[in-house]
Structure formats: C-alpha cells, structure tokens
Image: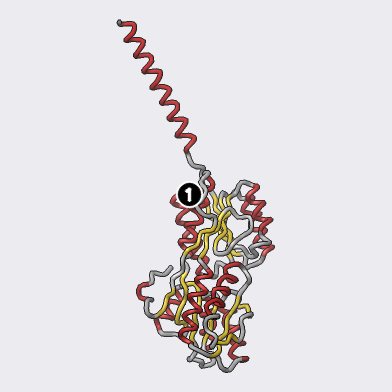
C-alpha cells in the first residue's frame, strides 16, 4: 500500500514536470517577434497629411516596443529616390516598411527586394505592386462626395479640376469625381489635366493659369487640400470671390478656411493617423503569422462642410 502511494506520487510529480516543460515551451514559441525598426517612405513630409500618417504609425509602433526606431523619409514622388530609400531600409534591418508609392506599378521590384529580405511591406495612401497589404482612404468615394457637393452648389455652368501626380489615390478620386459630375449634364469641365503637384504652390500656379485662361467658371475641385489652399490664395490675389472650391483631405488648414467662410466650402476627410496605426498593426500581425481579413483595407471618408464642421474631430 505504501509502495503504491509512493509510486502514485512519483507519477504525479512527473506529470506535473512534463506539463511545466510543455507550458514553458508553448510560452516561448508564442512569443512575438521583436519590432525594432519601421521604415516609412511617403510623398512629402512637408504635407501635413503625411506628417499625421507618420505620427499615427509611430504611436502604434511605440505601443508594441517603446524603443522602436522609426525611419521616415520623403520620396518627393521620385521613383528612383524611393527605390533607394527601400534599399536603405533593407540595409538598416527594418521589420516593416510603410510605403506611399511614387509609382504603384514600377515600385514593385523594390518591394520584392524588401520582402525577399524578410520585411513586411504595407502600402499606405496608394497601392503598391507586390505589397503584403494596403491601408488607404476609399478614394473613389472621396471624389464622389466632393464633386457631388460641388455640382449641387454650382448647379450649372463651368468648373475646373486640378489634377496631380498619377498615383492610384489621385486616379481614384478623379474617377469618383467624374462619376458624380456625369449626373449633372449642365456642368461643363473646362480643364482637368493640370498637375498641381500635391502642394500649395502647385495649386496656386495651376489656379493662376485657370483664372487667366478662363474668365468665367464657378467651381473648382482639387484632389487634395494643399492644392485647394493654393487655389484659394490665387483667387484672392485676383479678387475672385465668387468661386466654390471642394477638395479631399480634411486637413486642419482647409477646415479653418471652411469655418471662416472662405472659398473652400467642402473637403472629403481622410484619417491619416488611423491609416498609419492600422498599417503598423497589420504589419505587426503579418510579422507574427497573422494574415489580415482583407488585403486592401479602406477607410471611409466623411464630407466636411460648413453645416457639420463644428462636429468634425479632424486630424
């Protein structure tokens, strides 16, 4: 009897030890990979949109590892420069790259080099060939909203559209805009091919050209807020106060103009901070074998106007 009791105790101790070993092995195997470096290449860090995106990505990365290293650079929409930046991220041992592609198709080979080096690549703002996943605004809807508003306010007559570098987000906004304008045959588009270069100066230059060429137009759609602000400055210089401007971004400067009753009357908002944080979160999941439910993750825009600007939280 005593032998059986002793034997039972030994079996219990051995079982407990085995469970302890299995538990420790399971814990070790379940440990997440360390997030040490995140590389971010965007169009321009002079654009508040991309600054907010980087800030959102940084905050999310720091939640994962407070000591994480963030490498953020501007491509200035130059494919060769961005390709070199990706190579630099590879050399720096980046774990995740967030990429606002200068050329969504041509950047594919550089993306493949990063992935071959074991780096997760998440496209932000625009698509990028061969990226693991993408996070961006629903840009078609943003264009629809901004131009539906413009058409409603203009009613009939002439408008102009400011274009920008032909990345996927700009193309989609333009397509969404044209879709809305097609429902308003009394509106004529005088120009839609001028590149405002996603900048205030570019928007101002294009608007000056439009004001000089076309003495009579009632509305302007710009594909982003910096161009809309530039267009506003040009109109003010030439004392044209009877023009309605709608745009895309929901940036602080554009929102302030809407609040003050300026020429910008509407902007379809983006959420760049959320975009950056979502991209890091998805990249972190992919690092640890967790695939996102969707490869392309779209963030719904909100149309900000004088009617609802007081409730808009902004960036």
Considering depth in this image, is 123 or 296 the residue closer to the camera?
296
Q: Position of residue 163 (x, y in %)?
A: 60, 77
Above-or-below relation of 145 to 128: below
Considering depth in this image, is 150 or 305 the residue closer to the camera?
150
Considering depth in this image, is 210 or 59 the residue closer to the camera?
210
Q: Using the rendered view, name the quadrant where residue 125 is placed.
A: bottom right
Q: Residue at x 67, y 64 (%)?
A: 79
Residue on which the image places disc 1: 67
Q: Position of residue 115 (x, y in %)?
A: 63, 49
Q: Residue at x 49, y 59 (%)?
A: 276
Q: Residue at x 36, y 18 (%)?
A: 12
Q: Is residue 311 visible?
A: yes
Find numbered disc 1 in the image and state the secondary structure of the residue it sits on. loop
Q: Residue at x 41, y 70 (%)?
A: 314
Assess disc 1: are there few (<14), some (14-19) or many (≥20) residues with their C-alpha within 10 Å of its C-alpha.
few
Q: Position of residue 70 (x, y in %)?
A: 53, 55
Where the N terminus falls, by quadrant? Answer: top left
Considering depth in this image, is 64 or 280 the residue closer to the camera?
280
């Amino acid at each position: 009897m005593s032998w059986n009791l002793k034997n039972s105790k030994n079996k219990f101790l051995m079982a407990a030890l085995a469970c302890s070993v299995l538990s420790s092995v399971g814990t070790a195997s379940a440990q997440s990979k360390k997030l040490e470096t995140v590389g971010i290449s965007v169009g321009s860090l002079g654009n508040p949109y991309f600054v907010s995106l980087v800030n959102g990505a940084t905050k999310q990365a720091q939640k994962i590892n407070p000591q994480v290293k963030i490498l953020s650079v501007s491509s200035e929409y130059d494919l060769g420069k961005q390709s070199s930046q990706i190579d630099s991220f590879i050399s720096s041992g980046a774990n995740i790259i967030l990429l606002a592609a200068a050329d969504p198709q041509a950047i594919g080979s550089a993306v493949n080099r990063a992935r071959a080096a074991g780096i997760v690549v998440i496209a932000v703002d625009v698509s990028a060939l061969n990226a693991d996943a993408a996070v961006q605004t629903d840009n078609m809807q943003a264009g629809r909203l901004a131009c539906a508003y413009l058409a409603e306010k203009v009613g009939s007559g002439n408008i102009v559209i400011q274009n920008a570098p032909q990345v996927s987000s700009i193309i989609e906004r333009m397509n969404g805009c044209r879709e809305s304008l097609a429902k308003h045959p009394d509106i004529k588009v005088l120009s839609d091919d001028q590149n405002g270069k996603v900048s205030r100066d570019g928007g101002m230059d294009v608007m000056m050209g439009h004001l000089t060429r076309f003495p009579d137009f009632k509305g302007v759609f710009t594909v982003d807020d910096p161009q809309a602000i530039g267009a506003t400055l040009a109109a003010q210089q030439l004392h044209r106060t009877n023009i309605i401007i709608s745009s895309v971004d929901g940036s602080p400067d554009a929102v302030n103009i809407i609040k003050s009753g300026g020429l910008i009357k509407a902007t379809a908002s983006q959420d760049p901070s959320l975009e950056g944080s979502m991209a890091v979160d998805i990249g972190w999941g992919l690092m640890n074998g967790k695939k996102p439910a969707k490869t392309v993750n779209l963030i719904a825009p909100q149309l900000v106007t004088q009617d609802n600007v007081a409730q808009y939280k902004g960036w």
